[in-house]
Image (tube, rainbow, N blue to C red):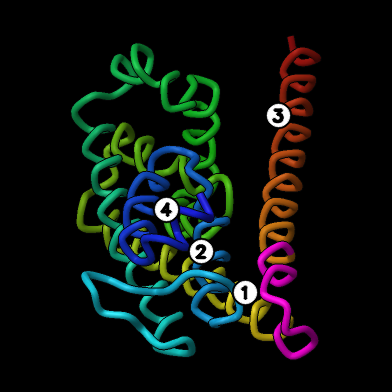
Amino acid sequence: MTTLIANHGLLAVFVLMTLAAVVPAASELTMIYGGAIASGTIGGQIALFGHRFHPGLHAVLAVALTALVANTLGACGGWLVGVYGGHPLLERYGRYAHITAARIARAERWFERYEGVAVPLGFALPLARSFVAIPAGILEVGFPRFVATAFLGIAVFVFATAGIGWGVGSSWHAASHDADYVELAVALIAVGGLALLVARSRRTLKMEARGSDSAR
C-alpha cells in the first residue's frame, strides 16, 4: 500500500479513500503516509495527471482535499448500498468485504446511542469510520443530512491524519537526513497505531459479548 501511494500519488489516495468509506482499507495508513510524502522527506511524490506538487503546505493540502472528496463519494456509495440493498445484500456479500452482521449491528447500536452526531463522529474516528455509511442508509438517514454531516467528520479525519504524517516527516527530517529511516519510522507509527486500534476494538467486542451472555 505504501508503494502504491509513493508511486501513484493522489490517484492512489483517491482510490484507497473511496474504498475506505465502506470497507476497512486502512484509511489511517493512507493519510499518514500521504502526509509524510507531502513533507518531502521520504520517497515518492504528490502528483496528479503529470502535475507535481512541491513538498510543503500545497502538497499536504492536495492530499487532504483529494481524500476528502474521495471519502465523501465513497460514503455516498455506501449510503446507497444501505438504502437499496439493506441487510439481505450484506448477509449475502458482506463477508467478502469484512462487513459482518455483528459489525453492522454494532454500528446500528452506535446510531441509536449517539443519534444526531453518529455520522460525523463516526467518520472522524479511526477504524469505526468504515462502518458508518451503510448502516446510515439502512436506518434511512436523510441523504442531505448524511452528506453534510459525513463531509464534516471526514474533513476532521483527513486533515488531522495528513497533518500528523506531515509533522512526523518534517520533524524527523530535522534530526536525520536518511530518508530510509524516515520512511521506516512513519510506517511503524502508522501500523502501530492501527494495531492498537484493532486490539482495543477486539477487547470492546469481547466485553460486549460477555455482557450479553451474563444478561441471558
Query: Mark 2 highlights which residue?
Result: 31
Kind of element beneath mark 3: helix
Residue range of the region highlighted in magenta in the rendering: 173-184
Which disc is residue 13 wearing?
none
Q: Earlier in the sequence, mark 3 or mark 4?
A: 4
**How far apart are the alpha carbons under marks 3 and 4?**
21 Å
Q: Quadrant of residue 120?
A: bottom left
* Depth order, front residue of 119/174: 174
Q: Main secondary structure of the magenta part?
A: helix
Q: Earlier in the sequence, mark 2 or mark 3?
A: 2
**How far apart are the alpha carbons under marks 4 and 2?**
20 Å
The reply to whether callout 2 and callout 1 are in contact (CB within 8 Å) is: yes
Image quadrant in which the C terminus is located: top right
**How far apart are the alpha carbons under marks 4 and 1?**
23 Å
Q: Residues within 10 Å of mark 4 (few under 14, many from 20)?
A: many
**Residue 119: image x %, image y %?**
42, 53
Tell me the kind of residue under disc 1. Answer: Ile
178 vs 115: above or below: below
Q: Which is in the foreground here, disc 4 or disc 1?
A: 1
Kind of element beneath mark 4: helix
The reply to whether callout 2 and callout 3 are in contact (CB within 8 Å) is: no
The reply to whether callout 4 and callout 2 are in contact (CB within 8 Å) is: no
In the image, residue 45 lies in the stretch drawn in magenta: no
Query: Mark 3 highlights which residue?
Result: 205
Query: Mark 4 highlights which residue?
Result: 119
Q: Earlier in the sequence, mark 4 or mark 2?
A: 2
Q: Quadrant of residue 47?
A: bottom left
Q: Residue at x 39, y 50 (%)?
A: 16
Tell me the kind of residue under disc 3. Answer: Leu
